[in-house]
Amino acid sequence: MDKPTKMKLKKGDDVIVIAGKEKGKRGQVAKVQPSANKVVVTGLNLIKKATKPNQQTGEGGGIVTKEAPIHASNVMLVDPKTQKPTRKRAE
């Protein structure tokens, strides 16, 4: 596997999705996966996942809705002043 790349996004950043089924929607970065170059955005890219019951944790089985990762190239940082998508550069 390739070595992790340096991510320009970090947890808590406001982003807007620029490609894919969630295009145009805004959210906040909940998790960053530098090794896969992906981010998880709160409330976006929701998937349904079937889970088995677990005796150790006491959780029952069923269908769970959770956020799936989005590739970092498909999101852009939102500028706090103008509220528009922007590119982040080294300062």
Image: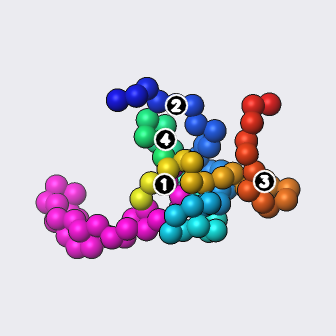
The three-letter amino acid code for the residue at tag 1 is Ile
Q: Is residue 2 left or right of residue 6?
A: left
Distance Cα–Cα, label 4 vs label 1: 9 Å
Distance Cα–Cα, label 3 vs label 2: 23 Å
Q: Is residue 44 left or right of residue 24?
A: left
Mark 3 neighbour density, 10 Å: few (under 14) some (14–19) many (20 or more): some
Which tag, 4 or 1, sits closer to the chain's start? Answer: 4
Instruction: Identify the mark at residue 70; answer none if there is no mark.
Output: 1
Q: In the rendered image, which quarter contains the N terminus?
A: top left
Can residue 31 be seen? no
Which tag, 3 or 4, sits closer to the chain's start? Answer: 4
Distance Cα–Cα, label 3 vs label 4: 21 Å
Say if mark 4 contacts mark 2, CB within 8 Å. Answer: yes
Q: In the rendered image, which quarter contains the C terminus?
A: top right
Distance Cα–Cα, label 4 vs label 2: 7 Å
* Part of the protein shown in magenta: 39-67
Task: Please name the residue that numbered disc 4 is placed on.
Answer: 37
Mark 2 neighbour density, 10 Å: few (under 14) some (14–19) many (20 or more): few
User: Relative to residue 91, is residue 23 depicted above or below?
Assistant: below
Task: Please name the residue that numbered disc 3 is placed on.
Answer: 79
Task: Please name the residue that numbered disc 2 is placed on.
Answer: 5
Mark 4 lies on a secondary structure that is loop
Mark 3 lies on a secondary structure that is loop
- Return the x and y of residue 46 as percentages of the image width and height: 43, 68
- Return the x and y of residue 14 as percentages of the image width and height: 67, 56
Q: Nearer the viewer, mark 3 or mark 4?
A: 4
Which tag, 4 or 2, sits closer to the chain's start? Answer: 2
The three-letter amino acid code for the residue at tag 3 is Asp
